[in-house]
Each structure stands twice: as C-alpha cells, then as structure tokens.
Amino acid sequence: MFFCEVTSCWAQNGGVGNENRNSENIASNANSEEYVVDYYLVEERVNCRFGSSVTRYKVSNINLISTATMGQNNTRKVTTVYKKVKPKVNQLQGLMPSNLVAQSNEITASITALPVVEAPKVEVVEKTEKKDYIYVDLVKTYEGVLEKGYFSIDMLKKVADSRFFKDDLNKAAQWYSKLFELTTDLEPIYYYRFAQSLRSVSQFEKAKEMMVAYEQKSISNSIR
C-alpha cells in the first residue's frame, strides 16, 4: 500500500475547475494492473483569525469529495491510498518460460505417482477458555435505538456518518434528515454530507439548498 497525494488550494473564485482536474488525475492513476484505489483521505483546513479548523474523513468513492469553494487561504488535501493487487496464479504461469512449465508438469506428475501414506491419527482436544469480553457493534446498537424513536444529536451524527462512509446513502439521508430536524448548528461538513445523501434519493432541490448553506458556512468560518 502506498500514497499518492494531490494537494489543492482554492480561493473564492475559480476553485472548482482546479479540483476537477485533480480528480481526473487521481482516477487515471487508479487504473493500474498492480495497484487499485483503497480509499481517499480528505483533509479540509479552514484558517481563522486566531487559529484553524481541520476536518479529516475517508471516502471510498471520489465523487463523494466536495468540489465546493473553501474560501480564501483555505485548503482541501486529497490523498489517494492504493493497495497492491495479489497476482493471479494463471497469469504468473503464463509468464514462465516453456521449459519451466514442462518441468513443473513433470514434477506434478511425479508427485501424483507417489504412494499414498496414511497420516497418523492425532486426537485433538479443544481447549475451552472462559471468554471475559464480548464484541458490540456500537453503531448498529445506536441505530437500533434511533429506530425505536430515541434521538440524540451525538448518536445521529455517529450513525449517519457511518452510513455515509459505507456508501449507504439512502440510510445516511434518513439519519441526516432527522439530525437537521433537531439542530442546524452543525459544522459545514454535515451540510455537504447531507447534500450528497439527498442526491442519492433524488431530492435535488433540497440537496442544492444544503450545498449553498455549506458554501456560506465554510466562507463564514474562514473570515472569523
């Protein structure tokens, strides 16, 4: 696994075009026989007067990365994480010289001709151990609580984000919608994620409203 970084900075004008070109570069690098894209790591930095705010998240689909303007002096860095593809055996055999292939076939035939020796019987006694822990899927547990009608802002954030990053955008739209019913005092990134989720359920007008709000909040945070 290795990293291929594409860093882009956008001002308030002309930023989206640059990002589209960067997205094309990432996609073209992913079409390799030896490596494939594992995920994209996104880091959005909003510089304020007395410091900066950094948001990091991973997505498996490059189309889920925002192309909206970040505001002057703010940055969005996209790191493409690749993983190595395991070679197929038949592909490797096709690359072997013919004499080695023939030798391999002869060895296989020789092994097949060997007498079969019965392995000695070994009695296996399973060791029983007392389990002093239990695995709990917290996100699934939270979602079960939400489905029963018990809502909290923190719980909705965790469940909606989990569904978003697993590309289950229909469920993500459901929980982000409930989150925005409880509060709109949220970080700009939640407006962006909600907009992407709404597009998956064909609520394009509302998705457009969320993107406008996302851009306004991003710019507002950058000039504080």
Image (spheres, grey):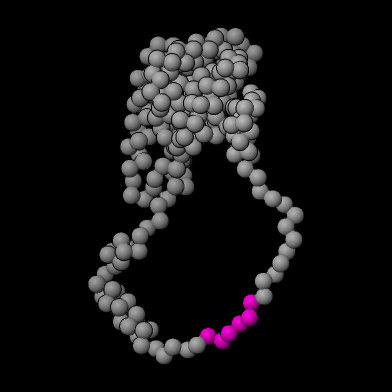
Residue 44 seen anywhere in this rendered image of the structure: no
* Residue at 26% from the left image edge and 69% from the top image edge: 97
Seen as rendered, the residue at the extreme left is 98
Residue 54 on image: x %, y %: 58, 24
Give the magenta-colored segment's residue range.
Answer: 119-124
Please state the total of marks drawn on the protein image. 0
Residue 218 on image: x %, y %: 52, 14
Residue 130 colored in magenta in the image:
no
Residue 122 colored in magenta in the image:
yes
Residue 142 on image: x %, y %: 63, 34
Q: In which quadrant will I find the C terminus?
A: top right
Residue 68: quadrant of the picture: top left
Q: Considering only vertical position in the picture, is 210 above or below 86?
A: above
- Asked whether 186 or 1 is in front, the reply is 186
Q: Considering only vertical position in the picture, is 112 above or below 52?
A: below
- Asked whether 194 or 12 is in front, the reply is 194
* Residue at 49% from the left image edge and 37% from the top image edge: 166
Residue 156 seen anywhere in this rendered image of the structure: yes
| Magenta stretch secondary structure, dominant | loop
Q: Is residue 40 left or right of residue 161?
A: left
* Residue at 53% from the left image edge and 24% from the top image edge: 176
Q: Considering only vertical position in the picture, is 87 above or below 29?
A: below
Q: Considering only vertical position in the picture, is 213 above or below 39?
A: above
Seen as rendered, the residue at the extreme front is 148
